[in-house]
Amino acid sequence: MINRLNGLLGILILLVVTATMITPDYPYKSYVFVLGPLLYLLFYLGLRLFFSDFVPILAKTTVHSLVNQVFQVLCVHLLLMGIGAYDHPVNYWFIFLASGLAFVIPVTLGGFGSREIVFVFAARYLPIDATAAIAMSLLLYFIRAIVSFTGVYFLMYPQKILQPLSLGVIGNHRLK
């Protein structure tokens, strides 16, 4: 649970960062950046209050979470480039991160469709191509599904998880 909350913290921090860079101007845009440290402080206080054993590793896990989310955004950016959506990439990043919040809410099977709904509604307020955003989201969903499906092998052969990886034999020496 704490790992999921830390991932959510990473999404929220990046959402705050991208909120300062999206194209439409809005009141107090230059002050939004203070929300990032405030979110971290609130998470720290909550962790300290309820799960104090995890406080020493909070900074490390938060950095890990941020790196994971940055790679997610990089994947989104590359998918957008692949489908030819080059205008206002930060707007797409912002909506993708916001849709991550909708993805967490279990209203659909595996989150399918929840991100897409967010993209459709967000296209009313930000200059994005909703069709490109939905295509990117579906591509990402199917790529994740295919990669996750490879885990079925280990469900069928759980003993393979514990076996050391054998790299072969060179001469009389077996490599591991």
Image (spheres, rainbow, N blue to C red):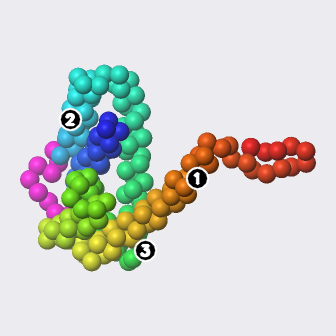
At label 2, the amino acid type is: Leu
Q: Can you say which quadrant of the picture contains the C terminus?
A: top right
Q: Which mark is residue 175?
A: none
Local SS, label 1: loop
For mark 1, does the 10 Å Cα neighbourhood hold few (<14), some (14 to 19), or many (20 or more) residues? few
At label 1, the amino acid type is: Tyr
Circle 2 or circle 1, nearest the eye:
1
Residue at the spot 24% in from the left edge and 25% down from the top edge: 50
**In 3D space, how far apart are the residues under numbered discs 2 and 1 (Cα atoms)?**
46 Å
Nearest the viewer among 145 and 32 is: 145
Rendering coords of residue 164 (x, y %):
68, 43
Residue at the spot 86% in from the left edge and 49% down from the top edge: 170
Examine the rendered structure and indicate whether residue 3 appears above or below residue 97.
Answer: above
Residue at the spot 33% in from the left edge and 74% down from the top edge: 135
- The residue furthest right is 171
**Badge 1 is on which residue?**
157
**Badge 2 is on which residue?**
38
Chief SS of the magenta region: loop
**In 3D space, how far apart are the residues under numbered discs 1 and 3 (Cα atoms)?**
36 Å
**In 3D space, how far apart are the residues under numbered discs 3 and 2 (Cα atoms)?**
36 Å
Residue 25 shown in magenta:
yes
Which of disc 3 and disc 1 is earlier in sequence?
3
**Badge 3 is on which residue?**
82
Residue at the spot 47% in from the left edge and 65% down from the top edge: 146
Which of disc 2 and disc 3 is earlier in sequence?
2
Q: Can you say which quadrant of the picture contains the N terminus?
A: top left
